[in-house]
Image (cartoon, rainbow, N blue to C red):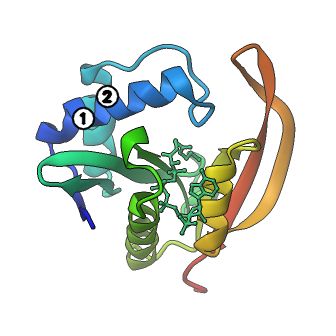
Amino acid sequence: MPTIRDATEADLPQILAITNAAILETTAVWNNTLATLEARGAWMRDRQGRGFPVLVAEDNGQVLGFASFGDFRPFEGYLHTVEHSIYVATSAHRRGVGSALLATLVERATAMGKHVIVGGIEAGNVASLALHARAGFVETGRMPEVGQKFGRWLDLVFMQKMLNSG
Ligand SMILES: CC(C)(COP(=O)(O)OP(=O)(O)OC[C@H]1O[C@@H](n2cnc3c(N)ncnc32)[C@H](O)[C@@H]1OP(=O)(O)O)[C@@H](O)C(=O)NCCC(=O)NCCS
């Protein structure tokens, strides 16, 4: 199994490659414009600077996937809720990498005292829906046709997991 650890600047080229493959090939990210190294670096430093994790799954120096969470919405009332994302390189799918990243995100959010962790998932993304269901997430929202990619409407499913009860 890969090691799950906090990402560093040296991981950014591999994070960028995984991000851009997801932009080009999937409905996991609702964007058509490729990311840049500068933008990924700024995103990572912003997340880490605000105390949020950016994790990588590494095996023998190779980044197989990455994951992170941040504010769900930028208003004080949402302070105890975070929204996460997970990306695994296609060549490493179905080897438990996504599950390991998700489990660590849940541990980190719990340790930070967060109350809810939520993921926004395209309704046709069976892999992500199954991954989250297996990790104890439940569907709490479904928004028809709120996005577009590859010339078709996309539905957004929210799945959340309750953490600390405080
Ligand atoms: C979704 C994603 C993160 C899953 O990562 P992964 O490392 O392949 O997942 P795991 O190997 O940990 O799989 C865990 C479980 O999820 C389910 N699952 C994963 N991929 C699946 C698929 N293609 N079809 C059905 N179920 C799937 C299975 O229950 C699996 O357990 P099993 O292999 O023992 O049956 C990965 O497919 C991915 O990065 N996709 C592109 C980006 C993306 O969709 N990110 C999520 C955005 S919300």
Give the residue at x 34% y 48%: 65
Q: Which residue is mark 1?
A: 14
Q: Which residue is mark 2?
A: 17
Q: In the rendered image of this protein, does residue 49 appear above or below residue 34?
A: below
**For the C terminus, which image quadrant?**
bottom right
Residue 159 in the image: state x and y as whole percent.
70, 60
149 sits to left or right of 105:
right
Give the residue at x 31% y 28%: 17
140 sits to left or right of 122:
right
Residue 81 in the image: state x and y as whole percent.
58, 62
Ligand 1, seen in the image, is in the quarter at bottom right
Is residue 128 at least partly visible in the picture? yes
Q: Nearer the viewer, residue 148 or 76?
A: 148
Secondary structure at numbered mark 2: helix
Q: Nearer the viewer, residue 117 or 15?
A: 15
Specify the amino acid type for callout 2: Ala
Residue 60 in the image: state x and y as whole percent.
12, 54
| The quadrant where residue 111 appears | bottom left
